[in-house]
Amino acid sequence: MNPRLPTPALSESRWPNLAPPRLEVRQRPRPAPPGWLRKIHWRTAIGALLLAGILHVTATLAVPLLGPGMAYHKLRELLPANTMVVVPPLRPGKQLLPFLMPDAYYGICRYSLANGPITVSAPLADLGWTLSLHTPHGDNFYVIPGQQQRTTDLSLVVVPAAEKSGDLIPAVTRRAPAASEDQIASPSQEGLIIIRAPLKGLAWKGEAEAALARAKCTLGANS
Amino acid sequence: MPQVGKLLVNLLAIAAIGVGGGLGSAWYMVEAGSRLTTRSFGPWTTWIAAGRPDADPYTRAHSARNGLLPIASTLELSFYAKTDSDGGQLQSACDYAVTVEGLEGAWWNLAAFDRRGGLIANAADRFSFSGDNAMREPDGRAVIVVARDARPGNWLPVGAGKMTLALTVQDAVMAAAVHAGGSIKPLPTIRKIGCR
């Protein structure tokens, strides 16, 4: 064969009928699930998930109802009803509640509306002071903060929520609805009224004590 | 016998997934919270709906289980930190500098507790600092040193063991921003100074 001549092309009709090459990608064999896992029936798995969901919801909803650590349950035994009790700044081992802000006086009234509305009068002497109302479940349904370097004298009447709406209790026990804005409807028959008086320092102790001494929580409405 | 083994495995699966998973996930959601119920800003975490009458069941359960009585988060926010700004556990063997900067206009209080919310006994009888009594640097910052031994300036004494710092901020605008998922004023940084 003359090497200078081009290589003769093989006509298409004479191409050998060869099968296309097979490309094989080697895959690692999947590890088989452990034997115990294969024994779990799919119905069991679904049942277990359903049980988990039910227990999750039940436990979450039950905690506030069982509530061994609930703040109100702890304070109910310590506080007389419808009386303002002034608690001095907290000390280690003598805390009312966990994580309660220290270096502050607290005026606390455990109220009960079973015998009628409650009148609360309290001064809020400065910024950081608050007056808050809580249900036994810890809902803070009313709160008012103090103003900077200005004493605000508050007077509130706490009434049952139904009484404020005026149509869910017998007319005999219903008090004429007052148009005053200081009427607070309590969603529960019992609860807590808390005045927090943070101390700026020891020099302000007397001032805070004197202000809290004026705080009152009495049965009956002034209006 | 294989049937008995299969039954046993199925019962164990129900117990593990059903009881363990159900109660375990509830405990986690109530104690630690999730993105649905809490918001974190650096080391600080707050329960978004704490104290509110329309709070979700997890928040209610969290407050009830821990005996908390929070003021509604529409007015006041309680932030808790168990770690410093670098993620290390807060412990009394170390000293920390808490720098409060940018909370102007808001009333705030910083207190140290043990992990169960108890006050830490100390000879100085000091348990917290607030915006009213913390000494300021010339640039307006308040640097509070949390340490076992006395330090000059704003010294917040702590005892032995792990601790939790609680920051209370009274600012209705900030509270609304937290609830809405918006940005808020910068919260204090917690920097480890050193350990023994």
Image: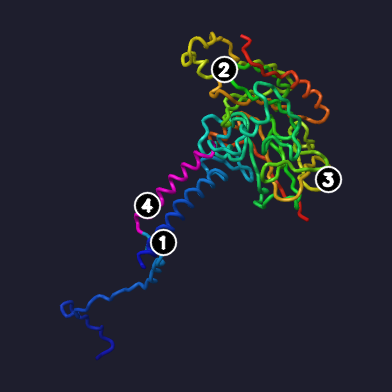
**A211 left or right of A183 in image:** right
In the image, A141 versus B175, the foreground residue is A141
Could you confirm whether marks 4 and 2 are on the same chain? yes
Cα–Cα gap, marks 4 and 2: 50 Å
Cα–Cα gap, marks 2 and 1: 58 Å
- What residue is rendered at 65% in x and 31% in y? A77
Q: Is tag 4's residue or tag 2's residue first in the polypeptide sequence? A: 4
Residues at badges 4 and 2 in contact (C-beta under 8 Å)? no
Residue A56 in sight in this render: yes
Residues at badges 3 and 1 in contact (C-beta under 8 Å)? no
Specify start and end residues of the magenta stretch as a single range: A41-64
Q: Is tag 3's residue or tag 1's residue first in the polypeptide sequence? A: 1
- What residue is rendered at 68% in x and 21% in y? A83
Cα–Cα gap, marks 4 and 3: 59 Å
Question: Where does the image place residue A151, in percent across and percent down from the top left?
Answer: 73, 18
Could you confirm whether marks 4 and 3 are on the same chain? no
Q: Residues within 10 Å of mark 1 (few under 14, many from 20)?
A: some
Question: Where does the image place residue A63, in percent across and percent down from the top left?
Answer: 53, 39
Q: Amino acid at mark 4?
A: Ile
Instruction: Tell me the residue that label 2 is attached to.
Output: A159
Q: Tell which subunit mark 4 falls on.
A: A
Could you confirm whether marks 2 and 3 are on the same chain? no
In the image, A22 versus A109, the foreground residue is A109
Could you confirm whether marks 1 and 4 are on the same chain? no
Instruction: Tell me the residue that label 4 is attached to.
Output: A46
Could you confirm whether marks 3 and 1 are on the same chain? yes
**B151 left or right of A188 in image:** right
Q: Amino acid at mark 1?
A: Val
Instruction: Tell me the residue that label 1 is attached to.
Output: B9
